[in-house]
Image (tube, rainbow, N blue to C red):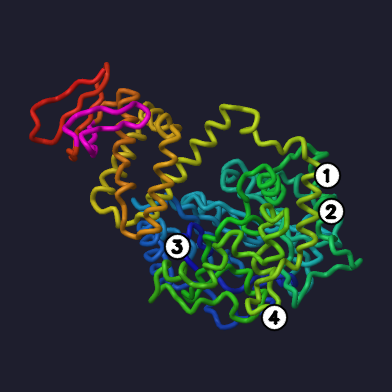
Amino acid sequence: MTGPLVPFREVVLKVHSRCDLACDHCYVYEHADQSWRTRPKTISDDVIFRTAQRLAEHAKAHALPSVSVILHGGEPLLAGPARLRRVCEVLTSAFDGIAELDLRIHTNGLQLSPRYLDLFDEFGVRVGISLDGDRAANDRHRRYADGRSSHPLVLKAVDLLHQERYRHLDLGLLCTVDIENDPHAVLDALTELDPPLIDFLLPHATWDDPPPRPDGSPTAYADWLLAVFDRWQEQGRPVPVRLFSSVLSTLGGGPSLTESLGLAPTDLVVVETDGQLEQVDSLKSAYEGAAATGFDVFTHTFDEVAAHPGVRARQLGLDGVSETCRSCPVVRSCGGGLYTHRYRSTGPSDAFDNPSVYCADLAALVRGIEARTAASLVAPEVTEPLELAASQRDLTRMLLARLNADIEDRGGERWARAWELAATVEASEEGARGLDEVLAHPYTRTWLLHALDQLHERPGSVAAALRLPVYLAAAAVRVGLDLSVDVSYADGRLVLPGLGELRIGATGEHGTARVRAVEDGFLVRRGEGDPAERRVL
């Protein structure tokens, strides 16, 4: 598998490995992998510290602007306020001055109280709660071990989270689909709680352990979800639904919004309570040890996990799905389905080289949503020139960020200075406007693509990338930004993209010139020792 490593931007940190519910659809306790039985119940100080250290190093090495850490379990609130405070303090300290830390917690809500929410407010920890719908739907699976309903306490937790002082922490509700539940009743119960987001998840299943289909229909899950979609449309889409938003986004040519759909590479890793580093947690549904990497936070870096074959397999986009999926017209939306759901112990040498066990459902869901919304799926870029310009600018910015991430330390001090200068240009409103104007020039996109190709085809070759300062100089000149920029010139010619070419030396001459914007143009000086400064209007 070739190509640069995809750094981890999302980490699931298991802070407690036991739960206070006995949900019969839980992949942690009820499916193939039973490794939870040997894990420590609660994460230790050593694991917290080493995880924070390793993750901060990873973020710094890849210049990540932010990293999400999701506190998980089991039931993470069972770790207690003191342990969760320790986690938040250590992570916050480790990321100080390196990257933004996005802390989240996913809970069943039974233990939620003002004591926890005050702590979460202090550290900006946002809270997602599992709820499968109305009481009848929720009680089908989400009960205590003695059979008692958990529904009243979950509603109490949602009400508490919706108090004015805590509402900004609310991430929304996660609902696992059960096709025996009334789809309209489920959606109504969830939307009545006015969450900021609803996320529907298909129950984890594989070809070895397929999902229940009481009526034998191969599209029973799509039919259920489309009934929810129709109800959601009738209600005027009162709450964002991630699954539907993702399908609508991909049908319109945009990105997937969820790991379970789309072709975007995975950027998630799991840290267990004992410090073991694992792949995406849902793999525990496939077989014992499916999520294991053999790595841990004490002796391995996150880059080593990112290079693991199992992780790389989920970063190949279209090349990472089965041959059947590659020829399917809806693959751009469904992405072959969740990786776990492709598992079959018999068949090809790669047990995940299969369509999803929900293949027919996913195809029917995508086509059903497309048929219902065809008129609204025309991308605004097609009809609005300004939208097209903004989209193209954003794409070029993404390429520039990708170049910075991929070049790492190969650009040396010259690249570090150039990237710091880029930040200086963009720090002011006029500088950002000038940079946008330069990024909109078609030659800029061509340069970025060439620099990326050169970087990957001839490792260590960064000459094209080091032309960044001439683009920054052009941006500064366009808006009259008071900034001196050292740029390279060749064959006696200085070229400022979008502004033109200036002869400043003899044919064959190469060197460095300093460009500085002035009110009516810009000044150019060749090298430190050159007394002549040319004014260009």
* Picture coordinates of residue 31, whole percent (x, y): 69, 76
The residue singled out by tag 2 in the image is 183
Distance Cα–Cα, label 2 vs label 4: 33 Å
Distance Cα–Cα, label 4 vs label 1: 38 Å
In the rendered image, the vertical position of residue 65 relative to residue 149, given as above or below: above
Q: Residue at x 81, y 44 (%)?
A: 371
Sequence-wise first label, 4 or 3: 3
Specify start and end residues of the magenta stretch as a single range.
Answer: 484-507
The residue singled out by tag 3 in the image is 5
Q: Amino acid at mark 1?
A: Arg
Sequence-wise first label, 3 or 2: 3
Circle 2: element type: helix
Quadrant of the snapshot with the C terminus: top left
Circle 4: element type: loop
In the displayed image of the protein, which residue is found farthest to the bottom?
38
Q: Residue at x 48, y 79 (%)?
A: 294
Circles 4 and 1 in contact, beta carbons < 8 Å: no
Circle 1: element type: helix
- Asked if residue 131 lies in the magenta stretch, the reply is no
Kindly tell me whether residue 153 is visible in this rendering.
no
In the rendered image, the vertical position of residue 175 relative to residue 269, given as above or below: above
Of the two numbered discs 4 and 1 in the rendering, the one whose residue sits closer to the viewer: 4
In the rendered image, the vertical position of residue 264 relative to residue 437, given as above or below: below
Sequence-wise first label, 1 or 3: 3
In the displayed image of the protein, which residue is found farthest to the front?
507
The residue singled out by tag 4 in the image is 345
Circles 2 and 1 in contact, beta carbons < 8 Å: yes
